């Protein structure tokens, strides 16, 4: 008698051109025939997913566009994303049952991983496993690369971080403080602002929604102007920052979360300041800098163990809450890194 | 009896917030008392102006704004700008009568130069004097710095130049060709396009006004995308270029001429491409790179003498036509560098 295992999955229903809704995904119960095995000769391994990551970039994969740096999701198939998983069975000699891995997996209980080079083995177990999705994963590395490689920071620089309580933002701010910078964060609620100032060591923080004029707000916090703007949102904040940059200022263009769901994105009007202020504005992807990953990993692990970096995680338990957690990213529901706890090892 | 000399002057009438008109300037006859002398003890020198330069950046000095990199014009005083002049009398030991100088002077027949360090002596006389306002002056140096220092060019790169028949643009395109790049220029008339292709060696050129969709036009000339966009105009062309940049593309933000006269500049909508394509966009001013001026001067002089660079100049004769020549910059009247010939040495 063939052994069948239930496999709950979060299915991507179809392409959208607006902000994601919970109903764009659907929880289904799939079945795995033949037991929890990696087929012989496949070179694949089968994992039990422990933690899954909700990241804003995933919204871009919900569009039917082949022009991005990453292919779109496949309608009818589980959402794909970063996860921390435990190997159950393996046909890849480099991985064995019991190994804990981090990298691309599916939004489901069990995944058969064929592109095994998209995951790395977690060798050390002295930080919580889920941290490999944030502090020591893509968002942490984005913060590290974006700040150190794109922003050309100097001690004493004035730094603005938008979406500052988000997965990337709250780490950028702390890296900037460790570098000797003056750091101001913008966030979407007074609770978040309180965390930034009182828990994460930001010099100042403000609720952007409560500012009638962002230009005025930035002049209040940066009377001498901004050296570095780490831009996670685009839109109005980018336009206001352009008005307040100092000569030779740098802008790292990271998330543009405010523009993710717009087919006709908002216009940026103040680019002329790039000439008069000689501003450098640069988009980047952490995946172009993977040669720096080991350096990042060791340094940030060390910062964390020494208590120099505080990491904020926002965890929901259960695959059934995954779609709500993901959608919440775009309304600013999460505080810090949004993670889904699917199962324990 | 006191000696009086007539001095015709182009006077700046007052600040504006729209495109410049001829009536924003006024030709007046001033008088110089005491003859053509530099006052003893002043450290100044008195020049006869030979050539004056019309440059788009001067429009910014017609605004009542102290936030720019250069102060506004003074209402009631002559327009200030780059010129080539002959020293008539000098109280500065470094300059003597008969010296030819290039640098900041007034739009008038004779100017008393107090900031003598803003002019350099022209020692070689093997290129036409007026070329020190273009090919070997600020526009040429802007092209050189912008292309070599900002665009990080590599042999084989695909390069788009807007306002390609302008003072800066036509030199950028030729520097790019000398660097082994594929170069396409956009310009405002078929006459200019013809010059770009048949006289200056651009690989392709097109009339932007005749293109119903700039995105389509750029895809025609850059089926594999754009590595470098040297942006002299901003606006729609910048937005279309952002859609067509290749991964790791570079944009040098130079003139934004299309936005010069707008108090509420046009929005740029496609900045999201900066992330997916990892684009670097950088504003710059040639004055930040003056340490490279001698290198530029020697190299471009050499190119010119070897016939490797063609320089296009658009000359009007007489101060009375200065304001019309300046205003014409913003409607694309000029072909190449716009110069006013005031007098012969």
Image (cartoon, coloured by chain):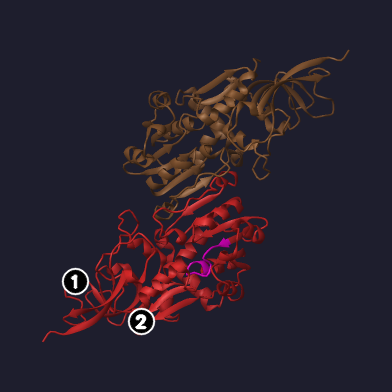
Chain colours: A brown, B red
Q: Image quadrant for the N terminus of chain A?
A: top right
Magenta stretch in the rendered image: B160-170
State which mark lies toward you, 1 or 2. 2
Residue B121 visible? The answer is no
Residue A128: name its quadrant.
top right
Q: Is residue A33 left or right of residue B293?
A: right
The subunit letter for the residue under badge 1 reads B
Q: Is residue A205 above or below residue B220?
A: above
Q: Is residue B52 above or below residue A266?
A: below
Residue B222, x across and y down, in percent:
65, 59
Q: Which residue is nearer to you in this view: B216 or B198?
A: B216
Toward the bottom, the furthest residue is B1
Q: Which residue is nearer to you in this view: B240 or B196?
A: B240
Q: Residues within 10 Å of mark 2 (few under 14, many from 20)?
A: few
Tell me, yes or no, whether the highlighted magenta stretch contains residue B107. Answer: no
- Residue carrying label 2: B318
- Residue carrying label 1: B42
Indicate which disc, 1 or 2, sits on the residue closer to the N terminus: 1
Tell me, yes or no, whether the highlighted magenta stretch contains residue B161. Answer: yes
Tag 1 secondary structure? loop
């Amino acid at each position: 008698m063939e052994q069948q295992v239930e496999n709950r999955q979060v299915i991507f229903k179809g392409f959208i051109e607006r902000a994601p809704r919970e109903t764009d995904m659907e929880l289904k119960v799939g079945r795995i025939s033949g037991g929890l095995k990696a087929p012989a000769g496949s070179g694949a391994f089968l994992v039990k997913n422990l933690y899954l990551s909700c990241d804003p970039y995933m919204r871009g994969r919900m569009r039917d566009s082949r022009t991005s740096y990453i292919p779109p999701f496949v309608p009818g198939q589980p959402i794909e994303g970063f996860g921390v998983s435990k190997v159950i069975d393996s046909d890849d000699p480099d991985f064995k049952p019991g190994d804990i891995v981090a990298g691309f997996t599916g939004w489901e209980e069990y995944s058969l991983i064929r592109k095994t080079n998209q995951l790395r083995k977690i060798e050390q177990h002295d930080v919580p496993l889920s941290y490999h999705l944030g502090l020591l994963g893509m968002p942490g590395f984005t913060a590290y690369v974006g700040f150190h490689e794109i922003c050309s920071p100097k001690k004493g620089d004035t730094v603005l971080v938008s979406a500052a309580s988000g997965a990337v933002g709250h780490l950028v701010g702390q890296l900037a403080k460790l570098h000797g910078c003056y750091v101001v964060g913008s966030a979407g609620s007074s609770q978040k602002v309180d965390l930034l100032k009182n828990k994460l060591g930001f010099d100042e923080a403000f609720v952007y929604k409560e500012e009638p004029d962002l230009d005025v707000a930035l002049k209040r916090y940066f009377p001498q102007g901004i050296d570095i703007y780490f831009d996670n949102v685009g839109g109005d904040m980018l336009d206001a920052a352009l008005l307040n940059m100092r000569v030779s200022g740098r802008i790292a263009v990271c998330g543009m979360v405010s523009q993710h769901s717009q087919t006709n994105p908002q216009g940026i009007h103040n680019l002329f300041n790039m000439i008069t202020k000689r501003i450098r504005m640069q988009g980047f992807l952490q995946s172009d800098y993977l040669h720096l990953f080991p350096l990042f990993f060791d340094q940030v692990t060390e910062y964390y163990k020494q208590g120099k970096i505080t990491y904020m995680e926002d965890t929901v338990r259960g695959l059934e809450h995954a779609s709500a957690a993901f959608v919440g990213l775009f309304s600013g529901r999460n505080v810090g890194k949004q993670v889904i706890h699917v199962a324990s090892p």
